[in-house]
Amino acid sequence: MKIELEDTLDQLYDIEGIEACMLYRIDGVPITIRVPGYREHLLETMFWLEKHISRVLGEMNREGLKETIFYFRNNRILIAPSSKSTVLVTVAKAEANQQLISLETLRATKFIEACVT
């Protein structure tokens, strides 16, 4: 199961324009991360997510959202719950194919949900 989760994140990370993929617990603790080495702006994003992911999820739940997107610097950050206890975060370049990334992130969340549940 762990290998399948890792493969799913690897496939998502390999899409052109994706800078990072991160699987978090709903309390903000990172489970597994795909990043291209040290990037300060990605570290800042990760630290922010660790502190605020539970509040973002609460707002998403209150508004009835399945996923949310926001922009931080030159990146598009897509947050999508992937199970009752995990959240998939995809960080993409602003010029990346947003439809493709949204669809592939949705596919990955369905697979992660099947593995975790």
Image (tube, helix red, strand yellow):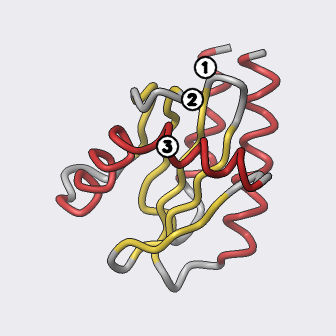
Q: Position of residue 30 (x, y in %)?
A: 40, 30
Q: Which residue is mark 2?
A: 6
Q: CA distance from mark 3 to mark 1?
A: 30 Å
How many neighbours does mark 1 have within 10 angstroms: few (below 14), some (14-19), or many (20 or more)? few
Q: Nearer the viewer, residue 15 or 26?
A: 26
> Marks 1 and 2: CB-CB under 8 Å?
yes
Q: Position of residue 68 (x, y in %)?
A: 64, 60
Q: Quadrant of residue 40?
A: bottom left
Q: CA distance from mark 1 to mark 2?
A: 5 Å
Residue that appears at 59% across and 37% down? 87
Residue type pointed to by label 2: Glu
Residue that appears at 33% across and 40% down? 51
How many neighbours does mark 2 have within 10 angstroms: few (below 14), some (14-19), or many (20 or more)? some
Q: How many marks on residues?
A: 3
Please indicate whether residue 104 sits to the left or right of residue 36 in the image: right
> Marks 3 and 2: CB-CB under 8 Å?
no
Q: Earlier in the sequence, mark 3 or mark 2?
A: 2
Please indicate whether residue 61 sits to the left or right of residue 14 in the image: right
Q: Which residue is mark 1?
A: 3
**Does 61 sit above or below residue 94?**
above
Q: Which residue is mark 3?
A: 55
Quadrant that contains the C terminus: top right
Q: Earlier in the sequence, mark 3 or mark 1?
A: 1
Q: Nearer the viewer, residue 90 or 26?
A: 26
Q: Nearer the viewer, residue 109 or 85?
A: 85
**Does 69 sit above or below residue 86?**
below
Residue type pointed to by label 3: Arg
